[in-house]
Structure formats: C-alpha cells, structure tokens
Amino acid sequence: MADIASLGFGRDIFQPEHDAFRESVRRFLQREVVPNVRQWEAEGFFPPELFRKAGAAGLLCSAMPTEYGGGGGDVLHHLVLQEEHAFVPEANLLEGGLLTDIAAFTIADFGTDEQKRTWLPLFATGECISEIAMSEPAAGSDFSAIRCQARRDGDDWVISGQKSWITNGPILTMALVIANTQSDSGKPTKSTFIVPMGLPGISRKPTELIARTCGGVGEIFFDDVRVPGSHLLGGETGNGMRAGLGLMRIGRIAMAARSIAASEVARDLTVEYTKDRQAFGKRIFDFQNTQFKLASAATEIAAGRAFVDSGMRQLVEGCLTAEHAAMVRLFCTEVEGRVMDECLQLHGGMGCSNEAIISKLYTLARMRRIYGGTNEIMRLIIGGAL
C-alpha cells in the first residue's frame, strides 16, 4: 500500500494539519479496525461503539466549528477521512464507515442554532450515528419521486413512508428524513426532519448486498411517526430539496476520492501479488501482458487523482459546479471499475476468494457506479450543462 508521503503526483492541496489528521485516522483504523474486521463480517455489522472510540480520538466532525464540538477544520478533513477508509485495505469493509459528516453538514448549513447545539456535539463524540434518509424504492436518482409524507398535526409532524439504501441503516440512532410536505400557503414542498430512531412507529431491516462486508445499508419504515415541530430542520418547510441537492457535490467528490484511493490500494496489492506468484517458471509480474495492464491502471489512477484534487480545490474555494462534481464522480468511478477488473483478473482464482481483499474492492467498486446517483444520471447532469 502506498505510504502517506507518496499518495499522488504532487498533491499540494493538503496542508500540514491535514497530513497530521490523515496520520491519526490511519493509525486509528489500523489499530481498531484491521484486527477485528473479519469477526465483524461474521457477526454482520461493525459495532456502534467504534463511533464512540473515533469520537474520543478526535476523528469525527473534524470540519465542524469548535463551538459545536467539532474539530474546527475544513471540508478537506472530511475528505481525508473518506480517503483513509479506502487507503487502509481492511477499512474498505466498513463501507459507509465512520461518516456522519454529511448529516453534520446538513444541520450546520440548514439547522437552527438550537439544533446545531443539540446534535452536532453528539455527532462529534460518536454518541449519535446519523445519515440523510433520502432514497426510496421508487426514488433513487430521481429525487422528485419521493413518496414519504409528513403532515402537520397541531404542533407536531407525522411521518409515513419508507426509505431505502440508507448508509449504516441498522445502527443509526438518528436520521435526517426528507419527506413531502405542504408550506403554510399550501404549496407542495419537500422538507427535512430530525428523526431519532427510537421513536414509536419506526422499524428497519438490513439490506443484503452483493458485497459481503461488515458494513452496509438498510431500509427504514415510518408508520405514523410523530416528531415535534422543533425537529423540522431549520424550522421551515421547503428545505428538503436544497439540503439534498446542495450536499450532493460534497458527496460526489468524496465518492470519487474513495474510488481513486481504493484503486491505488488494488494496484499495490496486485503488484505485490504478481511479484510473489509464479506461473510457467517465472513471476506473473514478468509477463509483458501483466506489466502493460498495470501500467495502464497506474496511468488512469494518476489522471483520476489529478481530477479528484481539482474537484477538492474547487470545493474549498466555493466554485465547484454540479456538472464538474458529476464529471469527477463519473470519471473516477469508471476508472475504479476498469482498474478493479484488471486487478482481479491478475489475481486469478485467488481474486474470487472471499478471503482476498481484492474481491471486496471489486464488488464495492461496482456499487459505487450506482450509489449517490447512477453514472447515467452523472452523464445527464453533464450533458444538460453543455
């Protein structure tokens, strides 16, 4: 695996504080995750306690203001945490992993001061595990097709519906639920609600995925779930579309970053494997075909790395457009797919073993071309901007 000093081709976007944070994240993952990940896989999910350990280590909500319990950093700290979930091979098996930042960004951007002071410190300590509940069985990439409803009942809201593909769904303690509402004028809107998972009327179940890991997603069902009016994010209806779409840019750059980091890991694992394994009296690495395949993979990874870093820079500078974020996500996940396919092939039969990390990387890479908006949707966004 590439060490921190050589993670790319002149990566000058990160400052010393980001590098120090990366070191802390990597040490934590190697200490807390690597020795336990196979046991968690057998048990079905990693333990919620991992969040509290990460919070105690200062790794959660690093981009949130200190006044709300965060680390006082910037969005690059969040992206470093995302990358390290991929750079540490076994940490890929956490899937969504120790990531409540998108929910935290949502509350930080749209919440009232009371909501920020109530919830953000709980995210930072790992006491609250949260995610945005947006997708539904008939509303994945099509945000407008959401059917989940929230109706007023006195000072409360009553939520009914179903959410699917929710990251860390089986262990969430709170979800930010986007539902159809009506404004005070009667206009149809979409709004976001802070919904603790222990409320009456909530049930959930894990979703079986093609990737056998210790993380995953789940479905959440809301049967007339009553939440107080104070749990309407920002105290106003109509914030759902802004909250959902506004954070997709961060999410797409983060997914691209993980794709390229995982691709680097796969390349390094494959170089190591092909130099160790022999066929017909010589190392697999010494066949010209092997070197050509790995050379192409290394070149595509370098291009993807430059593209990711440009997206990160624009995100920090506040000039990242929806179409550029879609381009970065599209290109990097497609690169990851090609790299993983070649690396799995070079592992031969061993690559198909559940015990081989490359098999996990391969299946997770396939899902990343769908999660967070399919690559076909990315092409529609880009095409619409031409």
Image (cartoon, rainbow, N blue to C red):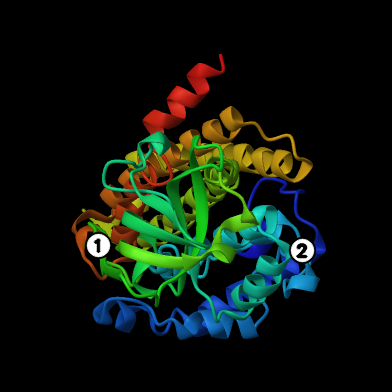
**In terms of depth relative to the viewer, which is nearer, 373 or 366?**
373
Q: Can residue 217 be seen from the camera position used here?
A: no
Q: Position of residue 297 (x, y in %)?
A: 45, 41
Check the image and report above or below for 150 versus 37.
Answer: above
Q: Position of residue 118 (x, y in %)?
A: 65, 74
Viewer-nearest of discs 1 and 2: 1
Q: Determine which quarter of the picture holds residue 39.
A: bottom left
Q: Determine which quarter of the picture holds residue 46.
A: bottom left
Identify the secondary structure beneath mark 2: loop
Left or right: residue 217 versus residue 114 is: left
Which mark identifies residue 368?
none
Q: Can residue 305 be seen from the camera position used here?
A: yes
Q: Which residue in the structure is indicated by mark 2?
A: 73
Check the image and report above or below for 49 versus 361.
Answer: below
**In terms of depth relative to the viewer, which is nearer, 270 or 202?**
202
Q: Residue at x 54, y 43 (%)?
A: 248
Check the image and report above or below for 121 versus 79.
Answer: below
For label 2, count other residues whose C-alpha is less than 10 Å away and answer few (under 14), some (14-19) or many (20+).
some
Q: Position of residue 9 (x, y in %)?
A: 67, 45
Q: Amino acid at mark 2?
A: Gly
Q: Determine which quarter of the picture holds residue 328.
A: top right
Identify the secondary structure beneath mark 1: loop
Q: Position of residue 81 (x, y in %)?
A: 60, 64
Q: Which residue in the structure is indicated by mark 1?
A: 207
Q: Amino acid at mark 1?
A: Thr
**In terms of depth relative to the viewer, which is nearer, 219 or 237?**
237
